[in-house]
Amino acid sequence: MIGLFIYVIMSSLGLTLIKIGTANDFSLKLDRVGVQFQINYVLVAGMCIYIISFLLSMMVMKKMNLSVFYPISAGLIYILICLLSIFVLKEKVSANQMVGMGIILVGIVVMNFKK
């Protein structure tokens, strides 16, 4: 489970850094001469963290049931992305999204009850 939580954190952080990096000094232009591509260190860091999180997810998935791994990781990533969007990116989150995050949390708790 520790690997799962590390994956969730790294994936969310990587995506947030990619968002920040694409907002600053990122361009991709196609013309007759070829392709011009400009990126920054924040974007590269986000991409590296996200790739590492992907590799970690494969290692964690190998040791867990997919029916447990995927719903928990997807739900937690969604919630963490929303929180990072609010606090880091200063984005607005609707009341529906907040209710949805609560429902996801309840679902994760219910899924993890032992029989």
Image: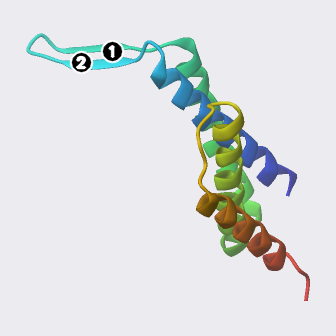
Position of residue 73 in the picture relative to residue 37 (left or right): right
Work out which quarter of the rendered image holds the C terminus and state it.
bottom right
Q: Mark 2 points at which residue?
A: 29
Q: What residue is at 52 percent from the left and 22 percent from the top?
A: 21
Helix, strand or loop status at disc 2: strand
Residue farthest toward the right in the current orientation of the protein: 114
Position of residue 21 in the picture relative to residue 93 (left or right): left
Q: Residue 79: give x, y in percent of width and height.
A: 69, 54
Q: What residue is at 71 percent from the left and 71 percent from the top?
A: 103
**Which kind of residue does numbered mark 1 sit on?**
Phe
Helix, strand or loop status at disc 1: strand
Q: Which dot marks residue 7?
A: none
Q: Relative to residue 101, is residue 50 depicted above or below?
A: above
Task: Judge the density around disc 2: few (<14), some (14-19), many (≥20) Cα neighbours within 10 Å.
Answer: few
Q: Residue 4: give x, y in percent of width and height.
A: 78, 54
Asked whether the residues under the numbered discs 2 and 1 touch, taking CB atoms below 8 Å apart as contact, a structural biologist would say yes
| Of 37 and 58, the residue lying toward us | 37
**Which kind of residue does numbered mark 2 sit on?**
Lys
Q: Mark 1 points at which residue?
A: 37
Q: Residue 51: give x, y in percent of width and height.
A: 58, 36
